[in-house]
Image (spheres, rainbow, N blue to C red):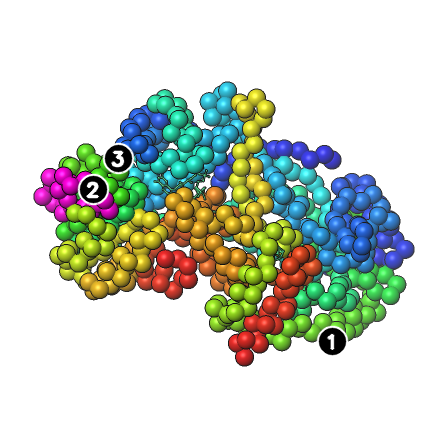
Amino acid sequence: MNQALLSKSRLADFVSYLVSGHKVVAPVPLQEGRFKFDEVQSLADISLNYIPTILPPKKYFMPQRSTLLRYDLSKGQDMEEMVELEKLVLFGVHTCDLAGIQCLNIVFSDRPKDLHYLARNNFITVIGLECSDYCDSFAGCAMLHNHLPKGGYDLFLTELAECYYVHINTQKGEEMIEEASIFEAATKAAEGELERLRSRKKELFTSEVPIRYQDIPRLFEETFDSDVWSQLGEKCLSCGNCTSVCPTCFCFDILDEPELDLGSGERVRVWDSCQNEAFAAVAGGDNFRKKRLERQRHRFHRKFKYLMDRYGRLFCTGCGRCSRSCMAGINLKRTISALIEERG
Amino acid sequence: MEAETVSIENSGYRIKHGLLSRITPLTKQEKLLEIRLPEGEYLDHDPGQFVQVSVFGVGEAPISICSSPTRREAFEICVRQAGRVTTAIHKLCEGDVVGIRGPFGVGFPVLPLEGNDILLVAGGLGIAPLRSLINYIIDNRRDFGKVDILLGCRNPESMLFSSEIGHWQKRIDLNFCCSVDHAAPEWAGNVGVITALIPGVNLYPLKTFVMVCGPPVMYRYVVDELLKKGIPERQIFLSLERHMKCGLGKCGHCQIEDIYCCQDGPVFSYQKLKHIRGAI
Ligand SMILES: Cc1cc2nc3c(=O)[nH]c(=O)nc-3n(C[C@H](O)[C@H](O)[C@H](O)COP(=O)(O)OP(=O)(O)OC[C@H]3O[C@@H](n4cnc5c(N)ncnc54)[C@H](O)[C@@H]3O)c2cc1C
Ligand code: SF4
Ligand code: FES
């Protein structure tokens, strides 16, 4: 069975079932129409209607700070490799964020594999939730082909009139459904309703910027010397918000954090940002991306060109977080439009 | 269901214990460290590769391996005191232990060099990775054609490996030429930039492979001179220095366009680099 239905009145029971056996994190409301992923106890805590959370689910896969090793100098540079694990159910993940998790999986599964990431990944169950309309004007998911589900989840819920249509993508998902025993078999009628919803979405979600997915890398290739980058460079404050909130930014730094006794401590990985001025500086005084425009261009090119060359997919999910969080008003969709306009 | 910390094996961040078996000061700023891995383990590197050297509590620094892989019982690194980690390394004594990860990356192409002539161009600390190659060549000298070494440094006092260089100069199967930026009048050698030495080298361009390592500013000029001599682009190899944290192609610090210097390099052919904006 790959499909099931969950009546709307039983969604609360499903969440309770999840909470009874797992730590569950889901979108919860903050002030001013903002949301974050946080631990929930019941459906009442969850915002089913939410726009992208401030931080993407990346924070569970690759936390802002995670331990790589624990060392003990009293035993002569002794160390043990570590990973902090926590069984989690991520509930209510939108398709753009599912795509973000897939991007991270690709990077950390690529050789040499990152066992710290992969161990943690195995402990996380992902339950997706379909959007039926745009989150807001910053979203660009259709341009990036991420408005429809393309895997990356154990279960995926789509809201229909009376029930949720559930796509079961993994054995783990199937086992949850069996254990919860509140799901019903999918019906022809529900399938028809799902199809109608998807075709309505195809009309509603049209590429937000006039460019096709496959043409995006070339646009960036051809506009490397564009004025648009100098304009971005002048505006950007190098605060690094855009990279922190990005679901596919994975750059990091490695630091030692000694205990107070200085004899032992942890080597940790922390998020870093290519927007920091010293990110690409080396001893001897050279800095390979000294100018803000170079760092901004690098950020965009990583999303739309470099990682495409390397991993065969665009690393922008269209979630719109960078544009939403930029204090300088740098807007991703407007930037791409400006590049298209300038290239002609 | 609290978070638990579990140990994992074979993490890319695991370090090996490197015993500092000998420390030789080379100049005021640089020290040569001989390192032995536990139980005589062979590092098994290629000339031009690097290791991450760590001092727990301070951090890690990428450092080129400067000894030849033909030497199996120990390897050497030459460390310039440049900041926190390198200062901590400088404070260590013989018998102390550092952490070693690696070797990482792609080094100088060794096999294609066989039977061909080799020109090595080193600026400053760039002699460190090239010394690995030079000693490799010396240990397999029959397999290579003519070997020319050009070395540039700030002044005679900052010259690294000077006694070893003395031996190279005496060998009939190596041509060695050095130039310093500044020197006292009694200096008998050349004064000027290293690029000025290139036109004078007697070489067959199509049969010559060139390996370059030095400060970033040097590369453009050196490459121009080499191209003027008619050396094909695919026979020029440059070692790039970038900020490197993980060495595993993940952290992003060493990235130039779609390449990660730590894994795809640090050594690249000019044929490849000329298409990569911001590489040299
Ligand atoms: C492939 C490669 C080979 C190298 N080989 C040698 C060598 O053989 N001998 C040698 O002495 N040095 C070598 N270096 C340079 C050496 O890695 C840096 O001097 C060292 O990392 C500085 O660390 P620090 O903690 O002492 O300095 P910090 O106090 O951290 O900073 C001092 C300066 O070093 C730069 N820096 C800091 N961390 C790094 C890093 N991880 N990578 C690059 N630059 C950094 C900073 O931007 C700053 O400009 C090599 C670098 C690379 C990338
Ligand atoms: S959030 Fe905006 S201002 Fe901050 S680094 Fe990103 S683009 Fe620059
Ligand atoms: S050093 Fe981390 S990606 Fe190269």
Q: Label 3 vs label 2: CA separation?
A: 35 Å
* Residue B32 appears anywhere in the view: no
Residue A64 falls in which quadrant of the image?
Answer: top right
Location of mark 3 (residue): B71
Residue B234 falls in which quadrant of the image?
Answer: bottom left
Q: Residue at x 22, y 39 (%)?
A: B156
Residue A60 falls left or right of residue A232: right
Q: Nearer the viewer, mark 3 or mark 2?
A: 2
**Mark 1 belongs to which subunit?**
A
Q: Label 1 vs label 2: CA separation?
A: 75 Å
Q: Is residue A297 above or below residue A154?
A: below
Which amino acid, by three-letter code, is at mark 2? Ala
* Residue A93 appears anywhere in the view: yes
Question: Please, what secondary structure does the residue beneath circle 2 have?
Answer: loop
Question: Please, what secondary structure does the residue beneath circle 1 have?
Answer: helix
**Magenta segment, prevailing SS (helix, strand or loop):** loop
Q: Is residue A84 above or below residue A271?
A: above
Location of mark 1 (residue): A203
Q: Nearer the viewer, residue B196 or B256?
A: B196
As drawn, the label of residue B198 is none
**Could you tell me residue A248's position as x and y percent?**
60, 55
**Mark 2 belongs to which subunit?**
B
As drawn, the label of residue B183 is 2
**Mark 3 belongs to which subunit?**
B
Question: Please, what secondary structure does the residue beneath circle 3 have?
Answer: loop
Residue A240 falls left or right of residue B200: right
Residue A135 falls left or right of residue B203: right
Q: Nearer the viewer, residue B256 or B16?
A: B256
Do discs 3 and 2 share a chain? Answer: yes
Query: Which region is colored magenta?
Result: B169-189
